[in-house]
């Protein structure tokens, strides 16, 4: 397993530097102590000699000779020597303080390090551990003293091989950021990264091994999750690509959009159905396609399959296809609809995405290009979020499709009725058509009609079905044209009886 280095051997380096510094300071203290002792003894003996010489001069009444004058100079030099001795004493104390500070600094660095600092003897038994072992393996420092470090490893090789490899590595300078697995106190396995080095005495013999270990279990888990996610995305992309190649992987069904007053179809909305196993809803397939970068391809594939069945759609009935703003911006959509020729005027493109559009000017230009071919625009799921309302205001669609969340319970929810009435009035004032989606009860249908909504879609009227099933339905009702064609509406009981489920 490749591991990216994160932590240097900070604690071990501090230990080594502190050890050498303490050794040097101790040696210096010894030299200074000996110097002070020798100097003090020398000064005392010199003082005694000088005093004896001058006492002899005074007692004998002799004239001082050169050696007596030299003795006097020595006596006068004593304050200087005393000052030097005092300075040496101060240096001695400063060295002692420095040694203590170095010891304290190492102790503080080891005890507060953000990682497990440890030391083992040549037999690989722990002789020191800082408190951070609790964060790594769950132990207190005193609980591992005397334990063999190898016994705490999750062994993937035999014990002797691991010890031999470790000693070879340490004898050649140690290791940096070595990955291993260790056993936690609770029995679980933790992923760790360690750096270590050997400690030598003055003769070059190894007297200990010291190191620094950090718990990287969270990092390893994150890498594993990333690998799993990459594998999942790769498999998902392969699945979508197979679906796009499989002629039977995707089929289209159609759900009528009916005129409320005449109960006859004004349009058919195309809906994708997937043959993949295990079964997944269409929204899951499309979301996954977008996630792996194949969203436009899958949407365009579904639109192409729907358009192939346009000749089977009854005259006067429009075909509604779903496309996200990004697919509308894709030139391949314009090329696909251009291939329909004059029949492109029978297509309504429903904007399906709920996310905000960053650049409406660019999207409007793409919409206008489609409109020049006769294609109309609808905003799907209106009222379900802020984005859909922005689509209405910025794109000025031909059709507004009210979301099921607004239509549900409209028959006894005053607020919903007021909102739908306002939306219907707004649409009429701008020459737009409103469709109520997700109609499931006759009471909801009646409430929509009372609010001024002219078209509806939902399981009350007809479930999604194949072209062949819907044509049987249209033949039974005798008309599939919009109200303007003057077709008589079937009774409500007949409509319900013909409902395709």
Image: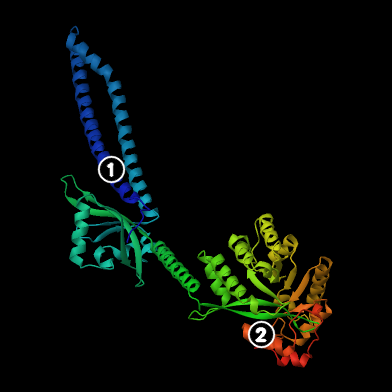
Q: Please give the name of the residue rendered at 23% of the width and 29% of the height, measured from the top-left corner.
A: 40
Foreground of the two, 90 or 299: 299
Q: Position of residue 106 (x, y in %)?
A: 34, 48
Depicted 415 relative to depicted 441: above or below:
above
* Residue 146 visible in the snapshot: no
Along the horizontal axis of the image, is 396 left or right of 148?
right
* Pick the front one: 157 or 378: 378
Dot 2 surroundings within 10 Å: few (below 14), some, or many (20 or more)?
many
In the displayed orientation, state which residue is furthest to the front: 341
Image side of residue 64 versus residue 351, left or right: left
- The dot on residue 281 is none
What separation in Å lies between label 2 and label 1 (alpha carbons)? Answer: 94 Å
Q: Which label lies toward us, 2 or 1?
A: 2
The reply to whether residue 68 is in sight is yes
Q: Secondary structure at mark 1?
A: helix
Image position, residue 85 (x, y; %): 28, 28
- Label 1 belongs to which residue? 22
Q: Secondary structure at mark 2?
A: helix
Q: Quadrant of the C terminus?
A: bottom right
The residue depicted at 40 percent of the width and 53 percent of the height is 112
**Label 1 packing within 10 angstroms: few (<14), some (14-19), many (20+):** many
Q: Residue at x 53, y 68 (%)?
A: 289
The image shows residue 255, relative to residue 419, as above or below, that is: below
Residue bearing the label numbered 2:
470
């Amino acid at each position: 397993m490749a591991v990216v280095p994160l932590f240097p051997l900070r604690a071990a380096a501090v230990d080594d530097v502190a050890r050498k510094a303490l050794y040097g300071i101790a040696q210096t203290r010894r030299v200074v102590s000996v110097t002070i002792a020798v100097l003090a003894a020398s000064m005392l003996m010199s003082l005694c000699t000088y005093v004896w010489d001058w006492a002899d001069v005074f007692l004998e009444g002799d004239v001082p000779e050169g050696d007596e004058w030299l003795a006097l100079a020595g006596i006068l030099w004593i304050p200087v020597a005393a000052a030097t001795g005092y300075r040496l004493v101060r240096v001695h104390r400063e060295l002692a303080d420095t040694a203590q500070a170095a010891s304290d600094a190492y102790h503080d660095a080891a005890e507060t390090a953000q990682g497990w600092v440890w030391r083992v003897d040549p037999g690989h038994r722990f002789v020191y551990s800082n408190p951070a072992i609790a964060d790594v393996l769950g132990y207190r420092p005193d609980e591992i003293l005397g334990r063999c470090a190898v016994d705490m490893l999750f062994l993937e090789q035999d014990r002797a091989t691991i010890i031999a490899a470790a000693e070879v590595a340490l004898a050649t300078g140690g290791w940096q950021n070595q990955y291993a697995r260790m056993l936690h106190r609770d029995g679980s396995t933790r992923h760790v990264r360690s750096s270590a080095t050997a400690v030598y005495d003055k003769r070059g013999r190894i007297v200990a091994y010291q190191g620094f270990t950090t718990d990287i279990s969270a990092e390893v888990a994150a890498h594993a999750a990333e690998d799993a996610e990459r594998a999942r995305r790769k498999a998902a992309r392969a699945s979508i690509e197979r679906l796009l190649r499989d002629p039977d992987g995707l089929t289209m069904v159609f759900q009528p959009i009916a005129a409320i007053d005449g109960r006859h179809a004004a349009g058919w909305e195309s809906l994708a159905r997937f043959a993949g196993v295990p079964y997944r809803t269409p929204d899951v397939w499309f979301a996954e396609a977008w996630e792996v970068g194949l969203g436009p391809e899958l949407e365009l594939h579904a639109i192409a399959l729907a358009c192939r069945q346009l000749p089977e759609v009854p005259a006067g009935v429009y075909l509604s296809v779903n496309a996200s703003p990004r697919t509308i911006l894709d030139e391949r959509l314009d090329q696909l609809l251009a291939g329909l020729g004059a029949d492109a005027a029978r297509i309504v493109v429903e904007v399906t995405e709920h996310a905000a559009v960053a650049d409406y000017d660019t999207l409007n230009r793409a919409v206008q290009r489609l409109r020049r071919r006769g294609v109309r625009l609808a905003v799907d799921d209106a009222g379900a979020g802020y984005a859909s309302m922005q689509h209405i205001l910025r794109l000025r669609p031909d059709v507004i499709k009210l979301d099921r969340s607004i239509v549900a319970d409209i028959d006894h929810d005053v607020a919903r009725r007021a909102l739908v009435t306002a939306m219907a009035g707004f649409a009429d004032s701008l020459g737009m058509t409103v469709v109520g989606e997700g109609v499931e009860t006759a009471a909801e249908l009646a409430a929509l009609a009372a609010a001024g909504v002219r078209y509806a879609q939902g399981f009350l009227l007809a479930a999604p079905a194949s072209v062949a099933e819907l044509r049987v339905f249209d033949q039974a009702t005798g008309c599939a044209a919009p109200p303007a064609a003057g077709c008589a509406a079937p009774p409500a009981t007949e409509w319900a009886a013909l409902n395709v489920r």
